[in-house]
Amino acid sequence: MTDRANPRPSAAIRAQQRCRARHRTPAVLVAVRHPVLRRWTTELLEGARGCWATVQSGDSELLADAIARIGPDVVVLDSLDFPACCKTALTDLGRDHVVVIGPEPDLAYRQSALDQGAGGWVSQDRIADDLPRAVWAALACDHHGCSLRSLMTTDASPCPSTGELS
């Protein structure tokens, strides 16, 4: 969609052109060091059904190997690993497609990650509230049925098949 007076594409068209996963379900790699936090983060992101496929790195897997194996559209990792880890892999992915989990809600940690090119930053104590929106923002586009509005819903309802909360 362009305007005849202004040949630049609309914001929606530009977002689709930036989208890494326009014609498929985006993959989100959760590469958090602590196994319990990694599992919990994965389960949280899996709750946004239809928005992305969530994959965990292995317990002893190097992040660069996980990125090569999965080919993610977004990587969620600890602040200790960013940007020191696998600089080439993150450069190929694009650091703006990295969401960093910081240790505490200190704006200095956030600013440091963003200054180093992260696409998003969330403190550990705000993961449940902020991580899905940060991942959505790092994708920089809307996907078949996934919208920021759906990620802002906090009402959980049980799945008719499994009884799990959505």
Image (spheres, grey):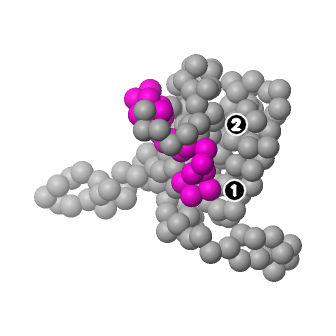
The answer to if 121 sits in the magenta stretch is yes
The residues tagged by marks 1 and 2 sit, at their Cα atoms, a distance apart of 13 Å
Q: Which residue is mark 2?
A: 32
The range drawn in magenta is: 109-130
Tell which of 45 and 34 is nearer to you. Answer: 34
Q: Residue 149's x, y, as percent?
A: 49, 68
Q: Which residue is mark 1?
A: 44
Residue drawn at 54 percent across, 23 percent down: 83
| Above or below, comparing residue 33 to residue 88 in the picture | below
Within-10-Å neighbours for mark 2: few <14, some 14–19, many 20+: many
Q: Quadrant for residue 70, please give it.
A: top right
Quadrant for the C terminus in the image: bottom right
Kind of residue at disc 2: Val
Q: Residue 160's x, y, as percent?
A: 81, 80
Residue drawn at 59 percent across, 36 percent down: 103
Tell which of 68 and 29 is nearer to you. Answer: 29
- Which residue sits furthest bottom? 160
Q: Earlier in the sequence, mark 1 or mark 2?
A: 2
* Left or right placement of residue 151 versus residue 166 in this view: left
The answer to if 11 sits in the magenta stretch is no
Q: Is residue 88 visible?
A: no
